[in-house]
Amino acid sequence: MSSAPSRMSSSTCVRSNGSNVDSPENRKPVRHSRGPKPRTIWALEHVRRMRGGAQSQLLMCADGKRYVVKFQNNPQGRRILVNELLCFILADHLGLPTQPSRVIDLSPGLIRRSRHQMMVETATGRASLVAGRCFGSEYAESGIATIELQTRLNVNEIENVRDFWGILTFDLWTCNTDLRQVLYFKSGNRYRMRMIDNGHCFSGSKWGFVDAPGLALFWNRGVYKDVAGIESFQPWLSRIESIDNSILEQAVALIPPEWYGARREAIEGLLRSLMSRRFQVRDQLLWLRRQNPLLFPRWRVTPEPAIAWQTADVPVLLHQQIIALDESD
């Protein structure tokens, strides 16, 4: 990847009617990165609150689209914003189906105009949201994420069901400790899936890796029924194993440093761990198959290759690799 994804390219911030953004809030978003610039757009109007632990809100933005926005002072911590944007860029690089995401600039004026809605619930009471750059995931106007649909949807109705195999490699690599969430979009008589919500990759705000491979599995195990062997996880597996450190550095260049407290050593530690984990994914897939052959009923390998990544005394939490960095930032 020689440049940032096209969806993150630089652009002029305008209202949906084409006029420049006016009012005293018409300041240019501050950027500190020397690398390629993410497309930062302005939030113009509050729409409504969203459900979830991060207490996201739906905002109308200057490109005429609505975004589900996570804020710097969300209850899960600023690092959740890093996780979301970094994982979006990396998943997009791997060719996985993602929901378009942006850096959203939230002005103090918008907070004042919507002060009764733009609040966050904390352990000590309600607090106003903090202005500045936030993470926004494009609201899926036609996307369906209802439990009712997801529980009755037959895997044969999912047009891109094989992408779940790629998502599994991604969630193993990034140590996603939350259940994988997806959206479905109607595509003729079938549905297409996109992955969303990567805030709990890297073990959430801890930025550590406590591997529990079973957590990376999608709840509907039927999506894996046609996996025929380790080769079924291509091309995603090879793309992870061959990823270059420069790609990770370019991705980090798109992340506002205030999201990680401007502590470069913290984000660099995260990148080093990602690089060192690239070749663990293959062994984790082999371990999953060995632990539960029925998970991949069509996988036939004789003899099975040796698995270097394992521990005998802890059957689920196999490997612990915590980044020793405090959370003071």
Image (cartoon, helix red, strand yellow):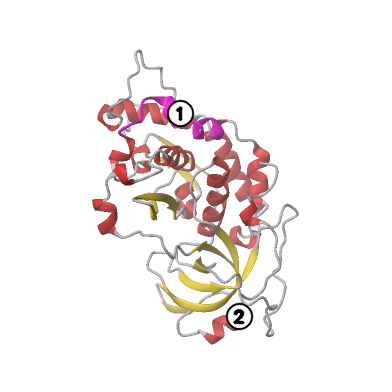
What's the distance in space between the residues labelled 2 and 1, CA to CA?
A: 47 Å
The residue at 44%/55% (across/down) is: 197
Q: Position of residue 325 (x, y in %)?
A: 55, 49
Q: Number of numbered discs present? A: 2
Question: Circle 2 sits on which residue?
Answer: 108
Asked whether residue 249 is in view, the answer is yes
From the viewer's perspective, is residue 154 above or below residue 287? Answer: below
Residue holding disc 1: 282
Secondary structure beneath dot 1 equals helix
Image quadrant holding the N terminus, namely: top right
The foreground one among 235 and 132 is 235
Q: Which residues are magenta?
A: 225-240
- Asked whether 84 falls inside the magenta stretch, the response is no
Residue at image point 44% right, 51% down: 194
Q: Residue furthest top?
A: 303
Instruction: Choose the circle earlier in sequence order: 2 or 1.
Output: 2
Image quadrant where one finds the C terminus: bottom right
Residue 292 sits above or below residue 202 on the image: above
Q: Amino acid at mark 2?
A: Pro
Depicted 265 relative to depicted 311: above or below: below
In the rendered image, which quarter is residue 102 located in? bottom right
Circle 2 packing at 10 Å, graded few (<14), some (14-19), many (20+), is some
Query: How far across and how far down the image is residue 179, in percent?
Result: 36, 50
